Image (cartoon, helix red, strand yellow):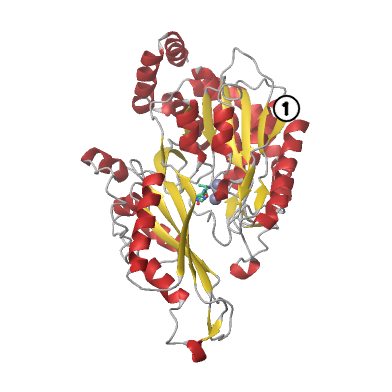
Amino acid sequence: MSFFYLSNRIIFCFSTMTKLIVVTFLLFHTSTSSSPSSLGSAAMLEPLFQYIDDHQNQFIQRLKEWVAVNSDSGDPTKWGEVERMLKMTADMIEKMGGTVELADVGTHQLPSGETMQLPPVILAEFARDPKKATLCIYGHVDVQPAKMEDGWVTDPFILTEIKGNMFGRGATDNKGPVLAWLHAIESYQATQKEIPVNIKLIIEGMEEMGSFGLLELTRKRNDSFFADVNFIVISDNVWATLNPALTYGTRGSSYFSVEVDGPKLDLHSGVYGGSIHEPMTDLITLLGSLVNHKGKILVTGVTDNVTVLTEDERKTYDKINFDLEEMKNVVGVKKFIQDTKEDVLMARWRYPSLSIHGIQGAFSDPGTKTVIPRKVTGKFSIRQVPNMDPTDVERKVKEHLGQVFSTLNSPNRLKVTATVGAKPWMANLGDPQYVAGKRAVKNVFGVEPELIREGSTIPIAQNFQEETGKSVMMLPIGGHDDGEHSQNEKISRNNYIKGTKLFAAYFYELSLLH
Ligand SMILES: C[C@H](N)C(=O)N[C@@H](Cc1c[nH]cn1)C(=O)O
Ligand SMILES: [Zn+2]
Ligand SMILES: [Zn+2]
């Protein structure tokens, strides 16, 4: 107890620089198992944990109501549902005593040329005490598309619990974690405990599209909403293994549409085949020029700036308790491109990748339609790592596709559009948030968290860090096998409920460091 009390007093009194050094020391050199905070926190947190356990079915019922809303931001015809989802979230926050602003983030032009009003962004806060640290929680309530015929075992919009796993679109990405934050706040309120930090919330409905409008809003509110924020925390990714984790890096993402527009109508392939520059053939050549079967990106210059791996960095991968066989089972493959655990993890986290997602306009139904589609649009994205810049990547991709297309001598029209340009994010591991996060994980799960990176993208993470200068940490609660964006996405009851406890414990641990 006295050690922890002392360490906190030291941190409180020292200059910012010294603070960072001490915190870095604590992060890497103290085991949270000996953290005296756990003694005080047990008494403080026990009633909250009890409340969370007692109300778990109610918390699951809320998740069921949220999952029932098909808030697919990728489909503009569903933006009304995205807005309804945001209003449901705003109502819940208001009922809990928070103040909510539905901030206007302007309009967005669709590929068709139509301009649409974007769903608003929730900026909320609970009562503010100037003596306390202010934590800003970011999350999103939009989802990826899901259809029963994609191969879901249960209806994606009816949360269904099977053997401790709750299946439904958005269960883990990101409705479950957003609700877990709100339930953690509720656990303090319901047990009449003062929330030890000031809480602000940013909840959006456009994350899966690249967070349209949120960067501009962040800039506009830098001197107001963000002014008193000390820490920004995000729980929108999953653990890498069976162990709880803290995430210190995410990849960025650029999303591209490649349109090849040809004849004025779809044509009979028997009548015109052989005489037409087929848009689909052009497109396949273009897509085939982007990446090889080993995952190597073939676009000239795109990977030039990727940092060279050092021996020290390589060693961080040895420590991760990742079971390659288990991961093969989770995704249903016999082998990965790489052979070792370290190389697989690095391919997912610290190297860029290029994935081809689909072709719009192509014949994709069952049957044997013998058509030459008149216009097709390929979709692909590049996950980016530190030192890569989305603007530079976009330029190089456009140059590459233009050059390949010119070799085809095709009369078709090529249009390449970048729809997302999200930067990669890396945290400052010396940040006090990581000390609090480690202690909260130890407290709730009884183990040290793994320090991991993440291959997917939280588009606003690096913008938050750059624009506001505040520290950003990712505190995932989803399991490694949750299947974000896949068929049968789920969150386990255990992760959802323990995750709620983790967030409650995190508020407390963070307040001790302030
Ligand atoms: C990690 C987060 N839950 C997520 O799924 N983010 C999306 C964001 C994105 C990137 N490009 C377009 N949207 C993702 O990583 O795919
Ligand atoms: Zn997602
Ligand atoms: Zn997400």
Rendering quarter of residue 334: bottom left
Residue 446 appears in the rendering: no
Residue name at image x 48 percent, y 29 percent = 467
Query: Residue 268 appears at what percent x and percent y?
Result: 54, 87
In what element is the residue under mark 1?
strand
Query: Residue 286 appears at what percent x and percent y?
Result: 38, 67
Q: Residue furthest left?
A: 311
For this rendering, which residue is in front, 509 or 78?
78
**Residue 445 higher or lower than 115, as above or below:** above
Residue 136 appears in the rendering: yes
Residue name at image x 58 percent, y 85 percent = 367
Q: Residue furthest bottom?
A: 270
Query: Residue 215 appears at what percent x and percent y?
Result: 54, 36
Rendering quarter of residue 430: top left
Circle 1: is it few (<14), some (14-19), or many (20+) Cα within 10 Å?
some
Drawn side of residue 308 relative to residue 169, left or right: left
For this rendering, which residue is in front, 371 or 498?
371
For this rendering, which residue is in front, 88 or 370?
370
Residue name at image x 57 percent, y 85 percent = 369
The disc labelled 1 sits on which kind of residue? Thr
Q: Residue furthest front?
A: 411
**Residue 94 higher or lower than 258, as above or below:** above
- Residue under numbered circle 1: 99
Drawn side of residue 97 relative to residue 296, left or right: right
**Residue 44 higher or lower than 458, as above or below:** above
Query: Residue 265 appears at what percent x and percent y?
Result: 57, 78
